[in-house]
Image: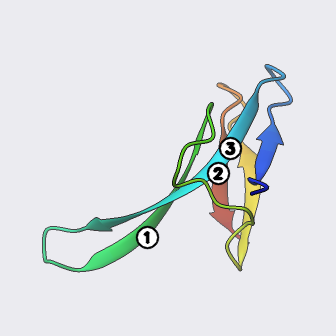
């Protein structure tokens, strides 16, 4: 499986995109997306529709933004 990844412009480190379904306090289920340094079992192979990758200027960590 090809996992979606991006390389930090600041550190040069590769980060892999993951998704996870969480249950909020009110019982509502929501999918969250996050980047990690290792590709784990919940890694996904494409950006979710309507999102773009941006990089935190201070830390160099990638994050998703609705765009």
Q: Position of residue 56 (x, y in %)?
A: 68, 37
Identify whether 47 is placed above or below 62.
below
Displayed quadrant of residue 37 = top right
Q: Earlier in the sequence, mark 3 or mark 1?
A: 3
Q: Secondary structure at mark 1?
A: strand
Displayed quadrant of residue 13 = top right
Left or right: 22, with 62 as reference point: left
How far apart are the two marked residues, 2 and 3, measured between alpha carbons?
A: 4 Å
**Residue at the extreme top:** 11
The residue nearer to you, when weighing 58 against 32, is 32
Q: Residue at x 64, y 60 (%)?
A: 44
Residue at mark 2: 17
- Disc marking residue 31: 1
Identify whether 56 is placed above or below 52.
above
Left or right: 52, with 39 as reference point: right
Residue at mark 3: 16
Q: Earlier in the sequence, mark 2 or mark 1?
A: 2
Q: Are marks 2 and 3 in contact (CB under 8 Å)?
A: yes
How far apart are the two marked residues, 3 and 1, measured between alpha carbons?
A: 16 Å
Q: Position of residue 30 (x, y in %)?
A: 36, 74
Q: Secondary structure at mark 2?
A: strand
The residue nearer to you, when weighing 66 against 16, is 16
Q: Position of residue 46 (x, y in %)?
A: 75, 66
The colouring scheme, among rainbow, by chain, secondary structure or one colour, is rainbow
């Amino acid at each position: 499986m090809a996992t979606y990844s991006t390389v930090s412009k600041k550190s040069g480190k590769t980060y892999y995109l993951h998704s996870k379904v969480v249950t909020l306090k009110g019982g509502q289920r929501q999918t969250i997306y996050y980047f990690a340094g290792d590709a784990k079992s919940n890694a996904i192979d494409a950006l979710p529709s309507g999102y773009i990758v941006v990089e935190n200027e201070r830390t160099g960590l990638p994050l998703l933004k609705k765009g």
